[in-house]
Amino acid sequence: MRSTKYILSFAAILCLICAVVVSSARVALKERQTINKQLDQKKKVLGVVGLFDAGETVSPDEINQRFADNMRAKLVDLQTGRYVEASDDQLANFDQRKARQDPALSTTVDANSAQVRRVPNHALVYLKMKSGEIDKLVLPVEGKGLWSTLYGYIALESDTNTIAGITFYEHAETPGLGGEIDNPAWQAKWPGRKAFNGDWKPAIDVTKGSAGSVEDDPHNVDGLSGATITGRGVGYLIQFWLEEDKFGGYLANFRNGSLDGGQG
Ligand SMILES: Cc1cc2nc3c(=O)[nH]c(=O)nc-3n(C[C@H](O)[C@H](O)[C@H](O)COP(=O)(O)O)c2cc1C
């Protein structure tokens, strides 16, 4: 028979060894996780402008190259709707979600349907370039679904109104229900629809049931069957981020060509 002291010491040493192993693994893998997360983000941004297909197998180097060749990152001051000077390093390391949680770097907003509580003062947008011109704008969006906050991007054509695509990179909605926001078939219903009405007020919405064609019903997208709440959340969150005091002001400046150095 082992003594109680022996058993307790054995258990304590085992716990200590396990704790050291787990925390070492966490520290050792952190950098790799960060790199993979950034890579995944780049795939989503490339995907929303049609430069990456979810089924494609490409090396990390190829993704980085494609991103560098086609996309330009910019920091936007949401209050002024103008670009903020930022080094490549600052752009690469800007963490919008962290900024949104920091009272010094974000602002509280009134209760809204997207259930967003704070908006970062600066937001990271991506410009898709084509022959030296800005072809599309990619804006980060977030808001509540049914169970979780949905994080994604909306891409607009350079008219700042026609939707080029929508994608999500993080959420915890139910697979097969709210999780259908990731379904390429549902995402394919967005391109060509119009984000704003004639007065430049956000107008795009997710209906319950089927929407009409892009031409006949440009401001509505099909709802998700059995997941009305998630679908409605997507509509609300996009409307929220397109409002004048979010990306609306920036998009107006872009349209008017009044951004520093023209539209670039
Ligand atoms: C286990 C379970 C998971 C669900 N997950 C979602 C979801 O992710 N998103 C959603 O909108 N509704 C989800 N629902 C359904 C909602 O509770 C609600 O009934 C639905 O949004 C209403 O949509 P409908 O009018 O299209 O049926 C879920 C229901 C159950 C029972």
Image (cartoon, helix red, strand yellow):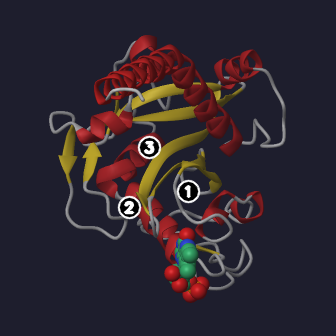
Query: How far separated are the C-alphas under marks 3 and 2?
Result: 22 Å
Q: Residue 175 carries which label?
A: none
The secondary structure type at the circle numbered 3 is helix
Instruction: Name the front one of labels 1 and 2.
Output: 2
Which amino acid lies under the numbered mark 2 shown in the image of this protein? Phe
**Residue 169 point in image, percent of width and height:** 57, 45
Q: Earlier in the sequence, mark 1 or mark 2?
A: 1
Seen from the viewer's position, the closer of residues 17 and 113 is 17
Residue to which mark 3 is pinned? 256
Q: In which quarter of the image is ligand 1?
A: bottom right
Seen from the viewer's position, the closer of residues 70 and 99 is 99
Which amino acid lies under the numbered mark 1 shown in the image of this protein? Asn
**Residue 63 point in image, percent of width and height:** 72, 23
- Find residue 66 and report its image quarter: top right
**Residue 125 point in image, percent of width and height:** 47, 35
Residue to which mark 2 is pinned? 240
Seen from the viewer's position, the closer of residues 234 and 171 is 171
Residue to which mark 1 is pinned? 161
